[in-house]
């Protein structure tokens, strides 16, 4: 029985870095972010909905115009909620279908908003990736070229880090103090044992 593992953490926590270590160990990883981007281009119903609600300028050369969409939803709570209500259900369904096809002892779905979207019950266990707020801010600013204010605005839309980590079954510390790889290796062994015990 393949265990369904959620991998979550706040912006700049280093979820993707941790996910890559699991991939190196041969564990399939579903990135909810990448899937959402792909589905916004490939899912015909979703494309039509986006065009209907956000206008024909949403797509340029048949691809989602991310700068345009970002401008539409970034500072508009209602438009962001509308976009999420279109994209999330399709991504959640796509992830469930993908997970059902996997045959490894466990699979990972990497998603920032597992608890926020209410999908925690679709996973057997959830791993949280934790890092101190100043470090998370630094990483996010460096990665996206965002300002401090933009990062804070995005952080404010996610559940507070300390609460999120308490909701997780396992926590990996990505604080540049404790090496990540040994933590992932130990957890990998534990998850394989849990899968066997099922």
Image (spheres, rainbow, N blue to C red):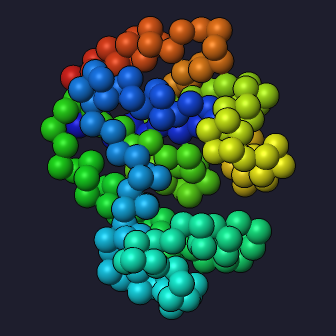
* Residue drawn 19% across the image and 43% down it: 102
* Residue drawn 33% across the image and 39% down it: 29
Q: Nearer the viewer, residue 6 or 147?
A: 147
Q: Quadrant of the C terminus?
A: top left
Q: Quadrant of residue 139?
A: top right
Q: Is residue 77 above or below residue 36?
A: below
Q: Is residue 124 visible?
A: no
Q: Using residue 17 as the reference point, say whether residue 158 is left or right of it.
A: right
Farthest residue, direction right: 149
Q: Using residue 61 as the reference point, say whether residue 65 is left or right of it.
A: right
Residue 51 in the image: state x and y as whole percent. 49, 86
* Residue drawn 49% across the image and 46% down it: 111
Q: Quadrant of residue 110?
A: top left
Q: Is residue 182 above or below residue 77?
A: above
Residue 182 in the image: state x and y as whole percent. 44, 8
Q: Quadrant of the N terminus?
A: top left
Residue 72 in the image: state x and y as whole percent. 67, 75
Q: Is residue 34 visible?
A: yes
Q: Using residue 144 as the reference point, say whether residue 18 is left or right of it.
A: left
Q: Is residue 86 above or below residue 15?
A: below
Q: Is residue 145 above or below residue 69?
A: above
Label total for image: 0
Q: Nearer the viewer, residue 43 or 144?
A: 144
Residue 104 in the image: state x and y as whole percent. 19, 33
* Residue drawn 51% across the image and 71% down it: 65
């Amino acid at each position: 029985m393949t265990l369904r593992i959620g991998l979550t953490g706040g912006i700049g926590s280093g979820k993707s870095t941790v996910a890559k270590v699991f991939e190196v160990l041969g564990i399939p990883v579903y990135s909810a972010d990448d899937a959402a981007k792909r589905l916004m281009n490939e899912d015909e119903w979703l494309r039509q909905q986006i065009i209907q609600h956000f206008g024909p300028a949403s797509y340029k050369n048949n691809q989602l115009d991310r700068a345009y969409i970002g401008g539409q939803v970034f500072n508009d709570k209602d438009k962001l909620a509308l976009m999420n209500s279109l994209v999330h259900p399709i991504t959640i369904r796509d992830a469930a279908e993908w997970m059902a096809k996997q045959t490894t002892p466990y699979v990972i779905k990497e998603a920032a908003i597992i608890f926020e979207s209410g999908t925690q019950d679709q996973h057997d266990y959830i791993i949280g990736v934790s890092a101190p707020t100043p470090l998370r801010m630094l990483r996010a600013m460096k990665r996206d070229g965002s300002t401090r204010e933009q990062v804070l605005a995005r952080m404010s839309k996610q559940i507070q880090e300390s609460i999120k980590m308490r909701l997780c079954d396992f926590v990996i510390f990505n604080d540049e103090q404790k090496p990540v790889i040994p933590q992932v290796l130990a957890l990998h062994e534990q998850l394989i044992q849990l899968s066997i015990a099922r």
